[in-house]
Amino acid sequence: MLFYLPIALTALATTLYHIAQKSIVPGVHPMVSLVITYATSLMACLVVVPFAPGGVTFVRSLRDLNWATYVVGLSIVGVELAILLAYRAGWKISLASVVANVATALLLVIIGVVGYREHLAARPVVGLLMCLGGLALVVRP
């Protein structure tokens, strides 16, 4: 059960995220929306810090951060802005996330195999080919 809980939480949170992104007022400047989004996220994180597991102090954690945390922050801005602009460009809520996530998954497979020397068995390769086929069907007008 604990194995699947993070995936279920991800699915629920991502669903809420896309509904909210699609509902942002079109006339609002995208960066202003992101500033408020991140201010809200900051407040939520600060409230949750004392209750989060880990046993490491807040200050110690700040000292131990590396470059990856900052790259994640910049990447999040890219993801948020891209999804917001996709919805404003007319992407359907039923397709935008699917197309973006399948494309991301395919890129991560290449990175995993080439950069991390991960091995892919035949069955996952067939699944990836099916994803490519599905992606082609979804994005065709």
Image: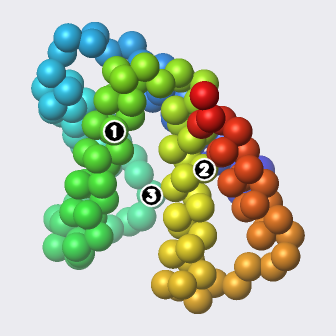
Q: Which of the image's four quarters has the C terminus?
A: top right
Badge 2 vs badge 1, beta-carbon distance below 8 Å: no
Residue 101 image position (x, y, % from top left): 55, 47
Mark 2 burial class by Cα count in 10 Å: few <14, some 14-19, many 20+: some
Q: Which residue is mark 3?
A: 53
Q: Earlier in the sequence, mark 2 or mark 1?
A: 1
* Residue drawn 53% across the image and 23% down it: 93
| Residue 82 can be seen, yes or no | yes
Q: Quadrant of residue 10?
A: top right
| Residue 36 can be seen, yes or no | no
Residue furthest out toward the right:
123
Comparing labels 3 and 1, the label whose residue is closer to the camera: 1
Cα distance in 3D space between marks 3 and 2: 32 Å
Identify the amino acid type marked 2. Answer: Val
Q: Which residue is mark 1?
A: 82
Q: Quadrant of residue 70?
A: bottom left
Residue 23 image position (x, y, % from top left): 39, 13
* Residue drawn 45% across the image and 29% down it: 17
Mark 1 burial class by Cα count in 10 Å: few <14, some 14-19, many 20+: some
Asked if residue 70 is positioned above or below residue 30 in the image, the reply reads below
